Image (cartoon, grey):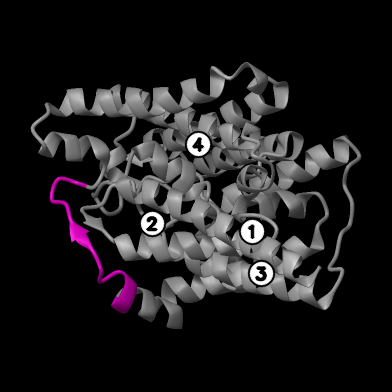
Amino acid sequence: MDNTVSPNTVLWLAFAISFVLGAIGQKTHFCTLGAVSDIVNMGEWSRMRMWLLAIGVAILGAGALHATGQIDLGKSIYRTANFTWLSYLVGGLSFGVGMVLASGCGSKTLIRIGAGNLKSVFVFIVLGLVAYMTMRGVLGVFRVNVLDKAAINFPGGQDIPALLTGAGMAPATAFSLAVLAIGGGLTAFCLLKRDFWTLDNLLGGLGTGLAVVAAWYVSGHIGYLAEHPETLEEAFIATNSGRMESLTFVAPQAYLLELLMLWSDTSRKMTFAIASVLGVIAGSGSWALLMRTFRWEGFVSLEDTANHLIGAALMGFGGVTAMGCTVGQGISGFSTLALGSIVTFLAIVAGAAGMMKFQYWRIMREV
């Protein structure tokens, strides 16, 4: 590709960003499941503030890149005209329930693999297979013909700035207002709590949010081609969707399994998403080895195995149906201010909280 960036550059940058993300996750115990669990069980908001800070920083960062013309958030998969509300709700609730049963979300699964958790290797395989079935297999038929049919069309786009513009506000004003109000509001909500100011909380929130922003820049700016030399069409280098991508960790696990299974097929290539998955595992593993916290861990009972099996399947189905996970929709998608991402975020939290309360009810019933 003359006068264009090499795909390898995009892939190595994606790996590097995710490597840092994996190390941060391992060091700070950034965990969306833990964030919900702390609130439900103890009324403790520190880890939730870490997640919300990551969202706030991602909104502000992505908004700045968009406003300065470095990227176009309208070219992401999140800002679509179709608001598939049922898919967001069902997918988000399924993912939330699943991550409780599987002891963590998609990104946490990769972080735990890096630290020697064999249960998470099992979750990774099942999640990836079910995600693939939901994208292109039998579950995909159900998703497209049933869930995705329930949709509301917003001709101007489903993102909040577009909705404000449709209500009569000037586009530039609507965008700035939405970014500053939501992104700035979430950031302030977290940072104004002095008890929150610990190294791990700040590193986890700021680092994760900035990783998402960096991924947008790599995919949407460095990897952007206004005219691909072979197709003569606009293109984003090394993305599975053919559009600008940031960090997400459900469908990419399916893409990695597909690549490994079809390695001899030269049409299959390493992509931004696959490099991100490998980067998180490598970053987490490196930190665990450096800190001497790497430990092999396996299943302790048949029930433990069954829970992880069901949880992984629900996350694979839910993550694809909702178009993302706690990072994919909860941070990357949220940073575009897409209404679907916000609904998915809330559905994931509701599904996880509901499952935790159900588990507590079961325990109390058996006492």
- Kindly identify the amino acid type of the residue bearing the numbered disc 1: Met
Instruction: Name above or below for residue 193 compared with residue 256.
Output: above
Residue 325 shows in the view? no
In the rendered image, the residue lying farthest to the left is 168
Q: Residue tagged by mark 1?
A: 356
Q: Is 366 one of the magenta-colored residues?
A: no
Residue closest to the eye, 325 or 42: 42
- Kindly identify the amino acid type of the residue bearing the numbered disc 3: Ile
Front position among marks 2 and 4: 4
Q: Residue at x 89, y 57 (%)?
A: 296
Q: Dot 3, crowdedness within 10 Å: few (<14), some or many (≥20)?
A: some
Q: CA distance from mark 1 to mark 4?
A: 28 Å
Q: Which mark is residue 241?
A: 2
Sooner in the amino-acid sequence: mark 1 or mark 3: 3
Instruction: Name above or below for residue 24 compared with residue 193.
Output: below
Q: CA distance from mark 2 to mark 4?
A: 17 Å
Q: Position of residue 328 (x, y in %)?
A: 48, 49
Q: Residue at x 72, y 34 (%)?
A: 28
Q: Dot 1, crowdedness within 10 Å: few (<14), some or many (≥20)?
A: many
Instruction: Name above or below for residue 204 compared with residue 135.
Output: above
Q: Which mark is residue 212?
A: 4
Q: Residue at x 74, y 43 (%)?
A: 284
Q: Dot 2, crowdedness within 10 Å: few (<14), some or many (≥20)?
A: few
- The magenta span reads 145-157
Sooner in the amino-acid sequence: mark 1 or mark 4: 4
Sooner in the amino-acid sequence: mark 2 or mark 3: 3
Q: Is residue 122 left or right of residue 168?
A: right
Q: Residue tagged by mark 3?
A: 125
Give the structural element (helix, strand or loop) at label 1. helix
